[in-house]
Amino acid sequence: MAATWPRSAWPRCGPGWSGTSAGHLEIRPATAARPLAGGERAELVAWMRFRDDRPLDAEAATVLTDALPPALLATWTTPRPVPSAELTVHFGTALDDAPGAGWALVRIRAEDASSGWAMDDAAVWSQAGRLLALGRANPTDSPATDLTTPAVTVLYPQLRREATRTTL
């Protein structure tokens, strides 16, 4: 993966896109892939940082694993709702070193997608290139899926208060 340093702000994905954390983050593309660009690969990579300069701790790393749009949006040209029905995050040992605030490189890619479900894997690295977290989300675009009680486990109460369903 050839990621470049942040250049310009990443435009919103399309009409109505309001990612849960988008207003709290500065997001800049790191590769040529863009949401809703009809690309060949279901992968998005961006540099991200919190606008309030919060440290890249476990809470921040959790938010960043699910902050990019679902990877399938890189292959689509029309927006549609794709909420995450499950999110699991594993933390890297770099968090033990208190990496501080600043930019993080975030990659999300779909490993598998069928029957209205996808398997998105995310990785978050510090500006120094140290792995902060790995995440796996199961987004769905199936209208038949009941998401009124999503099976999302959030370990931190601050995130639970801020959690909302993403609308694309």
Image (cartoon, helix red, strand yellow):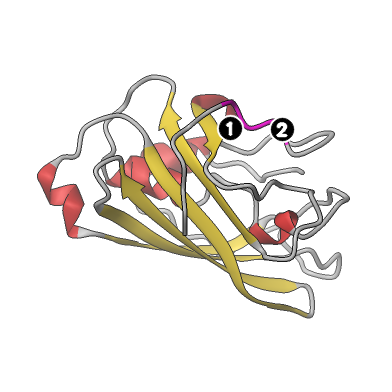
Alpha-carbon span between mark 2 and mark 1: 9 Å
Q: Which residue is found at the position 64% from the left and 38% from the top?
A: 19
Compared to 125, does 29 lie above or below? above
Tell me which amino acid carries mark 1. Ala
Label drawn at residue 22:
1
The C terminus: image quadrant: top right
Q: Is residue 95 left or right of residue 13?
A: left
- Residue drawn at point x = 43 percent, y = 41 percent: 159
Side of 15 where 52 appears, left or right: left
> Mark 2 touching mark 1, by CB under 8 A?
yes
Residue hosting label 2: 12
Confirm whether residue 111 shows in the render.
yes
Quadrant of the rendered image containing residue 92: bottom left
* Residue 10 highlighted magenta (yes or no): yes
Q: Which residues are magenta?
A: 8-12
Q: Which residue is situated farthest in the top direction here?
A: 52
Looking at this view, is 88 or 126 the one in front? 126
Q: How packed is label 1: few (under 14 Cα within 10 Å), some, or many (20 or more)? A: some
Please, what is the dominant secondary structure of the magenta stretch?
A: loop
Crowding near pointer 2: few (<14 within 10 Å), some, many (20+)?
A: some
Quarter location, residue 97 = top left
Q: Which mark is residue 129?
A: none
Where does residue 138 sit, x and y in percent of width and height? 60, 68
**What type is the residue that disc 2 sits on?**
Arg
